Image (cartoon, rainbow, N blue to C red):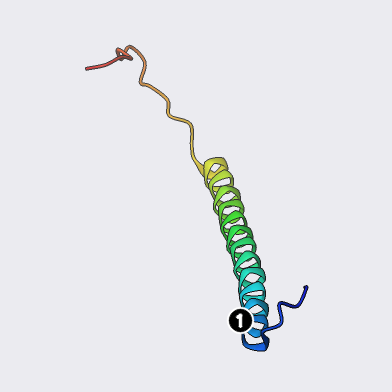
Amino acid sequence: MHGNGDPVRSYQMALRSLQEIRDRQALALAYFDVFWACAVVSALMVFLILLMRRSVAEKGAHVGAE
C-alpha cells in the first residue's frame, strides 16, 4: 500500500482493506456452508427415495385422474 502522508488516513485505509478481506472470506465460508448443507440434504433425499416402496395399482383399477 502506498503512503499518503497522513498517518491517520493510512491507518483507516489499512483497516478498510482488512475489513474487505474479512468480508470476502466470510462470504466464501458462508457459500461453502450452504453448499455442504445442500449436499447433505440431497444425499438424505436419495437415501429416502431408495427406501420408498413402489406403488402398485389394483387389478382392474382405472389409473388416471379422478
Location of residue 43 with respect to 55 vertically, above or below = below
Residue at (61%, 54%) from the top-left corner?
Answer: 35
Q: Position of residue 65 (x, y in %)?
A: 26, 16
Q: Residue furthest right?
A: 2
Q: Secondary structure at mark 1?
A: helix
Question: Looking at the figure, which quarter contains the C terminus?
Answer: top left
In which quadrant of the rendered view does residue 24 lie?
bottom right
Going by the numbered disc 1, the residue's amino acid type is: Gln
Location of residue 8 with respect to 19 vertically, above or below = below
Q: Position of residue 49 (x, y in %)?
A: 53, 41
Q: How many marks?
A: 1
Residue at (75%, 78%) from the top-left corner?
Answer: 3
Residue placed most toward the observer, 59 or 13: 13
Location of residue 35 with respect to 9 vertically, above or below = above
Q: Residue furthest front?
A: 5
Q: Residue furthest left?
A: 66
**Residue linked to disc 1:** 12
Q: How busy is the neighbourhood of tag 1: few (under 14 within 10 Å), some, or many (20 plus)?
A: few
In which quadrant of the rendered view does residue 12 lie?
bottom right
Q: Is residue 3 left or right of residue 60?
A: right
In which quadrant of the rendered view does residue 40 lie?
bottom right
Q: Position of residue 5 (x, y in %)?
A: 71, 82
Question: Looking at the figure, which quarter contains the N terminus?
Answer: bottom right
Q: Position of residue 58 (x, y in %)?
A: 35, 20
Residue placed most toward the observer, 42 or 32: 32
Residue at (60%, 58%) from the top-left corner?
Answer: 31
